[in-house]
Amino acid sequence: MDANLLEDVTISTNESSCERRKRSAVNRSSSEVDDCLEYRYKCPDQVRISWLQAAPFVYEASSNDNKSDEEHTENMKGIFPEVVTRAIARCCKIFAGTIPQIRFLERASNLTTLRRDLLRGKADMIIPVHNDEEKYGGSLPYVKILDSPGVILIVPHRQPIKEWKLVLNAVLGTWPVVLIALLMSSIAGVVMWVLVSITICCKKNVVQYLSKF
């Protein structure tokens, strides 16, 4: 009789423990595993992601031309890989109780290749995607991560230049014009000197000739 009561107490305790764990499932971290919970949804064992180089959103930290697809995952950097990896782990843990393996496939060469990987089933999702609609390609689910306000041009900061340096740079940049101006002024001065010298000599000769008579 005592043994039966002990079994009943143990079963009741286990059932109440499972109920408490089910109610608090949403608040647990995605790394916890609980076999007591029953999930309605199922996540795949792995999620294949095809990607296109678009720093700083998604890029590869180092070249992996001779490595397999799985080895790309450890070297993926940027905003999108971190957001997507955490989102998949969180959602699958809450709704399916498992965390799938994230595989970043080999980098796509262009947008056409990226789209073809998704449509032909080579990849389960693609990043990044530029789209303003709720469905990508008219039928595929699309999740917006962030809004891009536009293109930003980043240039190195330059120190202020003093006025005399600006003048010097302007003169050095136009030195052929300055040289031509100096040469023309010199030639004009020589011509004027020759004309004045000839005029003075002529006047002296005329005066000397008239003084003889």
Image (cartoon, rainbow, N blue to C red):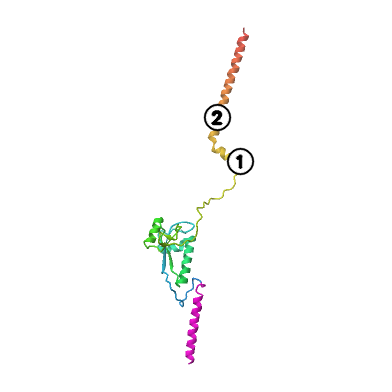
**Residue 142 in the image, given as x and y percentages of width and height:** 44, 62
Quarter location, residue 64: bottom left
Relative to 204, is 6 above or below?
A: below
Q: Is residue 15 magenta?
A: yes
Relative to 51, is 8 above or below?
A: below
Relative to 191, is 168 above or below?
A: below
Label the magenta part by its dominant secondary structure: helix
Distance of mark 1 from mark 2, alpha carbons?
A: 25 Å
Indicate the secondary structure of the residue bearing disc 2.
Answer: helix
Q: Which mark is residue 183?
A: 2
Q: Does the magenta stretch include residue 171?
A: no
| Quadrant (top left/top right/bottom left/bottom right) for the C terminus | top right
Relative to 115, is 91 above or below?
A: below
**Residue 202 in the image, given as x and y percentages of width and height:** 59, 15
Quarter location, residue 104: bottom left
What segment carries the magenta color?
A: 1-28
Q: Which mark is residue 164?
A: 1
Query: Type of residue at label 1?
Result: Trp
Query: Type of residue at label 2?
Result: Leu
Q: How crowded is mark 2: few (under 14 residues within 10 Å), some or many (20 or more)?
A: few
